[in-house]
Image: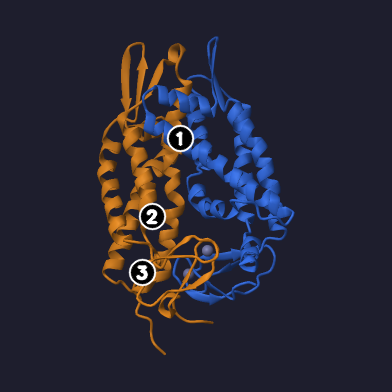
Amino acid sequence: MIRGSALERGLAGCSVCERILRIPPGAGHAKLRCPRCGAAVHVRKPDSLRRTWALLIAAYVFYVPAMVLPITRITTLGQVQEDTIMSGVVYFVQNGEWPIGVVIFVASIFVPVMKLVILTLLAISVHRRSQWRPQDRTRLYRITEMVGRWSMVDIYVVTLLVALVRVGELANIDPGPAAFYFASVVVLTIFAANSFDPRLIWDRMETPRD
Amino acid sequence: MKTPLITCHDCDLLQRRISVPPGSAARCARCGAVLYRHVPNAVERTAALALAGLVLFFIANAFPLLSIRVGPEVVSAALPGAVLTLWAEGEHALSALVALTCIVAPALVLLFLLRVFLPLRRGRVARGTVPMLRALEAVQQWNMMEVFLLGILVTVVKLVKMATVIPGPGVWAFFVLIFLLAAATWAMDTEVVWDRLEDGA
Ligand SMILES: [Zn+2]
Ligand SMILES: [Zn+2]
């Protein structure tokens, strides 16, 4: 087995075609181009931590109106009822429909918060040159990459409700302002996860020389 | 000729390529990330699954996903119609996001797979193959059909007390399409393309 990262040996791998490139001396972390497929090869993602922080902070800010403002407005015979994400969860749990309450809670509250917290902790751990369990931190990163998309569930439910509930006694459902903020949180955290480079976790490890 | 070395995308460990038995994957020795898979008849498989996916894509978009009946009235929602309703409500950003994640991204994935892997079955590398393969990973990330399916399920449960909910043909096509696309991209093997480029250079 070969020891150490490609960077330590002055090499980088193309993320599209897997070709190994030699990093020209003095190039640092600059952008290279794969000679085989022409893809941009980043030795490390550019400005990774700064961009991750910017996107995370924006996501935290948008998360507040997403939780506080109504996500749906139901008009029945002139009466308007507004629901936030949380009040929706509470409604289903109180009415004994806890499976759907749990689904909405996990997708709309637990997953985005968990994703934000994990990415924040990962970024801090890289700043502090943490030596703590790099395998597990990489695994946590892969989890955030995988689960973030499931937060879109509520947006899709609103989309379908708006399209379906337009007549009869069921009256009318409109999306509330929280829908926009919530969708923004999902998109921002996807970009945040994209801009974080898990290889930084391993770069900070003090490998025992032997 | 295959490069004898490979780097891990998640931890940058440089390691030797080893041959893996059919049906299994090579994993990074340090962080456990999947490096590559050995899928038998990978090119055939991807092409066939994407072709079937194309048919289902049209059914999934042309037919209603759900209908509800309240008294004498029946309202149906197909995916493109739902996106348009949202747009008409003035929710342009949301409408665009739903269109991107449930219609545009899946369509592009299908298109790219067909354009690359149908000619590849006959050993031909089509024009545009390389840029399409470069774009594929980014496009795939925005394909969220499986999440939309969960959204359909939640909607049914929400409405079932207020009205009669009837699943439309679109829903079944949607369901199968998710599995077809997942299997098609899972089997994807682009090694042939890169080998060809290396020879041609
Ligand atoms: Zn390349
Ligand atoms: Zn690795």
Q: Which chain is depicted orange?
A: A
Query: Residue at the spot x=51%, y=82% of the render?
Result: A2
Identified by mark 1, the residue type is: Val
- Give the SS element for disc 2: helix
Q: Is residue A100 above or below residue B5?
A: above
Tell me where residue A112 appears, x and y as whole percent.
36, 47
- Looking at the picture, do discs 3 and 2 lie on one chain? yes
Marked residue chain, label 1 = B
Graded by Cα atoms within 10 Å as few (under 14), some (14 to 19) or many (20 or more), the crowding at tag 3 reads: some
Which amino acid is tagged 3? Answer: His
Label 2 crowd bin: few (<14), some (14–19), many (20+), radius 10 Å? many
Q: For the C terminus of chain B, which image quadrant?
A: bottom right
Is A33 situated above or below B57? below
* Colour chosen for chain B: blue
**Label 1 close to label 3 by CB (< 8 Å):** no
Q: Which residue, given by chain and number where applicable, does mark 2 sit on? A: A193
Label 1 CA crowd tier, 10 Å (few <14, some 14–19, many 20+): many
Distance between mark 1 and mark 3 Cα atoms: 36 Å
* Location of residue B186 by image quarter: bottom right
